[in-house]
Image (cartoon, rainbow, N blue to C red):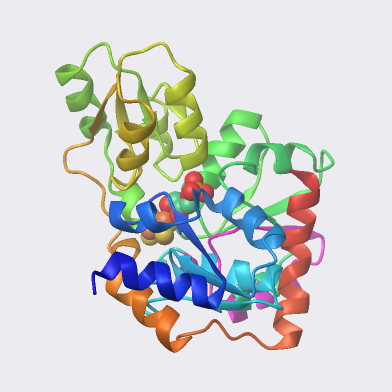
Amino acid sequence: MHILKEIAELKAARNAVILAHNYTDSAIQDIADYVGDSLELSRKAAECNAPVIVFCGVRFMAETAKILSPQSIVLHPEPGAGCPMADMADPDEVAAYKKAHPDTLLVAYVNTTAATKREVDLCCTSGNAEKIISALPAGQKIMFLPDANLGNNVSGKLSRPMNFWHGCCPIHDRVTPSDIEKARAAHPSAPVIVHPECRPEVVALADAALSTGGMLKFVSDSKAAEFIIGTEIGILHRMRNENPGKKFYPLDPAPVCVDMKKITLEKVRDTLRDLEPQIELDADTIARAAKPIEKMLEMS
Ligand code: 13P
Ligand code: SF4
């Protein structure tokens, strides 16, 4: 049987919902019920009420779905699809920091493990970081973790001092100012949009720094005919599909998140057939990690 038919039949039999991040392979995006950025996928997970959620993305995203929808079976087709940035904020180190700085609010980018989310006060995504930080009282000490680039970009934009953890996304941190200049020279009339996980000196050269959902809105709202896209290339699939008259150029070298690409059609089929591997989190972790995420959803 063709794999797409197998997936469709298994999905119906399991009454499953497939959620996929904007960076997954185009074949995965095409079979998903919903494709989005981290914030949009958290909202979907919280409201979907499905008995089975297949989460196509990296592990922290699937964990967030389980935390927000603990009654659902959350399947993660490839347990080895992690996020190197999320692993840069070790839960014990974060707990020790909190103990040593009781007057500091710990704001965690959603790109953190469930074990680390247990230790923090509030979450944010790249889509709501500015809104969340600007809602905090002036003078409140903040430790922003794990992404020092996102933290610096938000802090600069809001003129709000913060402390930063020592983490970054290896894929976005690798983008250089000369990559942007090269792309601009090749396509001088195209606006440059980058992800705020890029370094501040890269963001300074761009026309906009947005979450992946924000980028999709920007390109569909814009009157420009072509765009330079400074993020993971998986997003070009939706951009091209949703904006057939416009042109999209990736950077050179094109940023690729190998972990996102570990989710394949075969693994989606297998996980639906076997109901494994599941995200399993203990009740205490779910209860504690849910607090900073729910606070974020209320504020955004
Ligand atoms: P978005 O929330 O913008 O989709 O970002 C998630 C991510 O992992 C970016 O590298
Ligand atoms: Fe993590 Fe970077 Fe991949 Fe996003 S692109 S999932 S931050 S490694």
- Measured as percent of width and height from the top left, residue 180 is found at 26, 29
Instruction: Examine the image and state in which quarter residue 200 appears.
Output: top left
The vertical placement of 220 against 39, above or below, is: above
Residue 110 visible in rendering: yes
Residue 101 in magenta stretch: yes
Q: In the rendered view, does 275 fall on the left or right side of 104?
A: left
**Residue at the spot 20% in from the left edge and 17% down from the top edge:** 187
Q: Residue furthest right?
A: 137
Magenta segment, which residues?
A: 86-112
Residue 34 in magenta stretch: no
**Residue at the spot 30% in from the left edge and 51% down from the top edge:** 26
The vertical placement of 184 against 143, above or below, is: above
- Measured as percent of width and height from the top left, residue 240 is found at 31, 32
Q: Quadrant of the C terminus?
A: top right
Q: In the rendered view, does 272 fall on the left or right side of 122?
A: left
**Residue at the spot 41% in from the left edge and 21% down from the top edge:** 207
**Residue at the spot 35% in from the left edge and 76% down from the top edge:** 269
